[in-house]
Amino acid sequence: MKKERSKKYRILQALRILSQTLFFLLFIYLLFGTHFPGEDYIGRVEIFFHFDPLLALATFIASRTIFVSFIFAAFTVILTFVLGRVACGWVCPLGSLHQFFSFIFKKLKLLKPKKNIDNRTAWKYYLLLFILVGTLFSLDLVGIFDPLSLLYRSFATSVLPAFSHGFSAFIGLLYQFNLSSLGDSFFQFYEKLAVNPTFLQGFFIGVLFIGIVLLNISRERFWCRYLCPLGAFLGLISRWNVVKLKIDPQKCIECNLCTIHCQTQANPFPEEEWKSSECVYCLTCSAICPTSAICFPIKSTPEKISQVDLSRRKLIFTSFLGVLTVPFFRLSPSARRASPKLIRPPGALPEKAFLQKCVKCGECMKVCPTNALQPALTEAGPEGIWTPMLVPKIGYCEYYCSLCSQVCPTGAIRELTVEEKTQIKIGLAWVDKNRCIPYVLGTPCIVCEEHCPTSPKAIKLVKIEVKLPDGNIKTPVAPIIDTDLCIGCGICETKCPVVDKPAIYVTSVGESRSERNQLLLDIIKE
Amino acid sequence: MKRRDFVKEITLGSLILKFNPALFAQNKGPPDLAWIKGDSPALLTREAIATLGGMKRFVSKGDIVMVKPNIGWDRPPKLAACTNPEIVKTIVELSLEAGAKQVNVIDNPCNPARRTYVRSGIAEAAKKAGAKVSFPNPHRLKKVALKGEWLKEWEVYTDFIEADKIINVPIAKTHSLSRLTMGMKNWLGAVGGNRNQLHQKLDQAMIDLAAFFKPCLTVLDGYRILIRNGPQGGRLSDVKLHKTVVAGVDYVAVDTAGATFFEMSPQELPYLQIAHQKGLGEINLEKLVIEKRTL
């Protein structure tokens, strides 16, 4: 018998790799493009998320509201319905990354493709069920596991910042070697990239991400194979698709290469055991087959479908676990009483609605022009992990900027015009008179007042009397806050010359989005 | 000539010299200050420089010129928080016309440079005129001996040290500590380090920095001035359309002239008095030759 690999499928495989590369580059391009574009309004840099039906479904169930932009997710659903999980194999940037590293690990002989088939592929279905059960009770954990959120968050808060530090060090090196004109050009380019370099949890998120990539040493595309809840969701709706694997029994020599090299354990051989819900149509099997025995014809009549073995007992157990977990997430005090440090970006919905919608993707953190938005750890309770909060010690909310509200893919931050944004309070500033330079030393300062962006300024200067240690009295002017005018942007805290623990600081009280987290009752004011 | 006529003329001449020296000085050379009013910021600037004797007086062929506007804030030109872009543009054009090899524009702003450079309109205007507009580069900061009274040394952007000529193009605004911010305060944008601590002795810092940078020319933007809520403003009502440009070599004199926009005298601005005492410039406008003109 003639031994020859299929030319057609090898070309298709090359096309698939090209498609993966292009989509990955598009993802990176949009990631880099997510910064102040020189105008007040930015284009749809968050478009990838709107093609994600898992995010659409989970935020819909958790928040009980429909976000129109998710209409694009219907396209992915229809595509999967008709053609199977091609989105996983041909488009998903995280899938491509995993596949790339699997390839590298194979070349390094760290990863040896194995024949044995296990039932861990069921994990992702349990995880999906767990997430969706939670959303029924408005507990939205989808952002932690969704592949696009995971990838974007890891890149925005960890990979890019690390790259930025490396690049910066390289520029420094150029100057050390007296290549200053080269250093100048590189620096101006670096500035234009506008990568935020500082993230509270950059290290933690980075370690998790590297861990997920290293899992590929154990199994090819470990994440896609066992863990990805979006893959599971697409797998569930893909079983009726019209592109099915077919093995020509005349040609097949039962070498098992197809099953050994299958990227996602779809088990191409024997044909009856092939799992269409696991197949991502990478076409490795048909391209690798030494006798061109495998093809993917279009079949209108679905035959008997082999499925991942989901035990009913475990499904019930997972559902229970999902239900039982919900109250544990609600033990945190953050639900009862606002946290002072939890300063949400302008336009953020009231906390409860915000948590039901935020998918922790990090778009807002990437676009923030001052690096102010940071992933929370415990400030918003366990379900609020990696949700955005403003940390004024790192950056402040730029007065004429509403970019975070424009790039939020789920509407957790309501889209605002710049005009609307300037009217929103995200907190209030407080002067720490025990640390403020004029209050303590009688020395002039006024830096907070100078930077206050509102007109009239929310920070006023009043003459005060300071008794110095030597008994002398000084009468400098010192800052005092007009709480009506203060919008909580935090530039005062960012710029305060008392660097270690600023003598003026912002807390969340007074934020426009909350009814309860207020200083004064409106009735009293009037 | 008769002896009588000779004596007559000598007497007349010395009388004129004694009581109105300006008459003679005017013929001798350009005035100390050009003080021009009019409708177009660009034309005002051109006229002011022409009155001072043209840009060739300040910029020589092949010079690398540093133009230092105020690009401190993320505010559009109409809010008068940054120097008028038209004025910056004109200065760049004039410098290049005078034969400058390169014109650089840099400011270390308070809001991120990526935003202020754009919203102020200065980056675009200056680039259009042929300037090289760069973001302040921390790799180019260098601690240098300022030899000031308070600031012995400080981190300065070497772009300013390496320039052959420096032209200061500030805008006139109110400020809660120095009362007004004009030319001498503008130098806080040419340095790095913990700038926020300079406010603890701001007047002295301004003087030390101004004496160090020694601009060959200061062009004060008084087209739109910020009369309250400075140095950022924020509302149109904080802005007054003053339609003036004052230019001169003596930067203390230029700031003194700028103080009159706000109806303030140098006696109300301690930094001007100290600068004058140190011999950095003149604060008595009557001792200066000023050419005021309205276009």
Image (tube, rainbow, N blue to C red):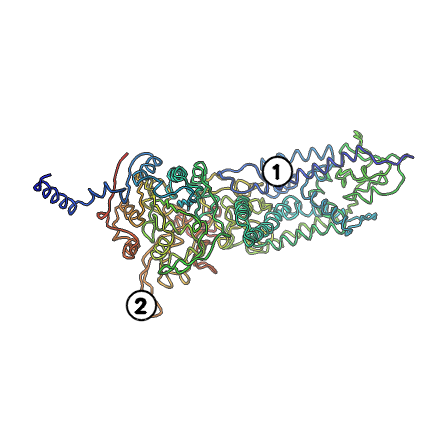
Query: Is A233 in front, or is A437?
Result: A437
Choose between A387 and B105: the one closer to the eye.
Answer: B105
Residue under label 1: A50
Per the model, the C-alpha gap separating discs 2 and 1 is 65 Å
> Whole-percent x and y of residue B214?
36, 51
Q: Are marks 2 and 1 on the same chain?
A: yes
Say which residue appears at 57% left-offset and 47% top-offset.
Answer: A355
* Helix, strand or loop at mark 2: loop
Residue A362 appears in the rendering: yes
The amino acid pointed to by label 2 is Asn
Across and down, in percent, residue B128 comes to: 45, 36
Task: Give the mark nearer the N terminus: 2 vs 1.
Answer: 1
Q: Is residue A270 left or right of residue A411?
A: right
Q: Does residue A518 appear anywhere in the picture? A: no
Q: Residue B54: x, y in percent?
A: 33, 39
Name the amino acid, label 1. His
Counting labels gives 2
Name the outermost residue toward the left. B4
Extreme-right residue of the structure: A1
The quadrant of the image that shows the N terminus of chain A is: top right
In the depicted view, which residue is nearer to us: A56 or A313? A56
Residue A200 falls in image quadrant: bottom right
The residue pinned by badge 2 equals A472
Q: Chain of mark 2?
A: A
Q: Residues within 10 Å of mark 1 (few under 14, many from 20)?
A: many
The answer to which quarter of the image holds residue B67 is: top left
- Whether the residues at callouts 2 and 1 have beta carbons within 8 Å, the answer is no
Tell me the chain of label 1: A
User: Residue B92: which quarter of the image?
Assistant: top left
